[in-house]
Amino acid sequence: MGPIDQLSYRPNRAARMLRTGRIKVIGLIVPSVANPFWGSLARELESIALDEGYHVLLCNSERDPARELKYGEELLADGVSGVVLCSSLPSLDHVAPLLSRGLKMVAFDRTAQAGDPPSLASISVDNAMGAELATRHLIELGHRRLAFVSGSVNSVNRRERLRGFRAALESAGLDPADAVVWPGADTAEFSDKDAAELGRKAARELLSGPRPPTAFVAVNDMCAIGICRGAKDAGHSAGQDVSVVGFDDILLADLFEPPLTTVRQPLPEMAAETFQQLRARIDSAPVAGRSLLIRPRLVVRESTAPAPEPIPAGASVPAPTEAGQSLGG
């Protein structure tokens, strides 16, 4: 054992920053630590970063642009090497000043939007494709009265998932105006910590109405789990007389009863690509932004089953109940 080991010496990060202008730490700003999906992403990204000699500092923004900016400013002041910003807000104008001051950043969980800073890389699962896979699966099982449960779809990824839901209905010859969006595409506030309760409330209201849906597409797995519980409250059984599909494939999806059919986001692949894009910006001159879409996969489990009374494709479907809002409305 050498003298350094005997003295339990540890490098001083502040001194290192004075020499290099940065420390080998990356920031990870997530929308909500209440959603297990973000914990899984943090684990994947941290594993990759540690192998490359980096540490990860986790920040929770609650989808608040002011908090995203504040965390970005503090991370920049602390001399971190770069930041992964998990944000599906419609605009990232608020972080443009950070980029102009030299903060290296990659946006995760968003597709590139008009007006995004040109140097910003955007990485996301193909949300529209994922929702289309989920909806097509339910249609193939004979379901014709479908509900999309999301809350507000003002964020980029939720808007894309609604688009995929609608595209699947149209391609099957069903009228999207006859599907239910609960509780209204542009009116309901929604945070990840409320997702399960939102799903539960949606299922109770819709399944207690006179013309209940037989299948639900949920904006994420926590919302889907709430739908399953709400179905039970209303006297229905998820996976038997009601089908439910989630989105994300969090760890709980396979452990829940019934095991949840869901759209899997391939987190290991997405985390690796995110770190690679951020590392390229840390190690080199400015890199042009690019938008990467990762293909999702439908994982079929026990929360979906054939419709109790299959209706032939193209058959007339009653108008939505007052509890929901039609896609065409």
Image (cartoon, rainbow, N blue to C red):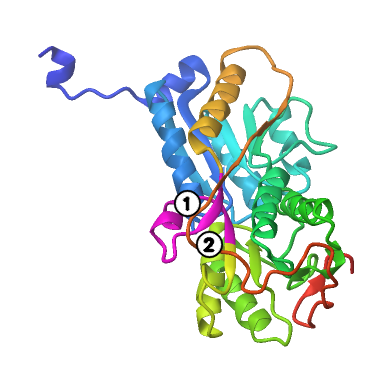
Note whether residue 18 is visible.
yes
Amino acid of disc 1: Ile
2 and 1 marks in contact (CB < 8 Å) = yes
Give the quadrant of the C terminus: bottom right
Note whether residue 65 is visible.
no
Q: Tell me the number on the disc at residue 294.
A: none
Compare marks 2 and 1 and give the one earlier in the sequence: 2
* SS type, badge 2: helix
What residue do we see at 14% from left, 14% from top? 3
What residue do we see at 13% from left, 12% from top? 2
Disc 1 target residue? 250
290 on left or right of 263: right
Residue 171 is covered by the magenta coloring: no
Q: Callout 2: 10 Å neighbours few (<14), some, many (20+)?
A: many
Give the quadrant of the N terminus: top left
Q: Tell me the number on the disc at residue 222.
A: 2
What residue do we see at 78% from left, 41% from top? 93
Q: Nearer the viewer, residue 110 or 304?
A: 304
Amino acid of disc 2: Met
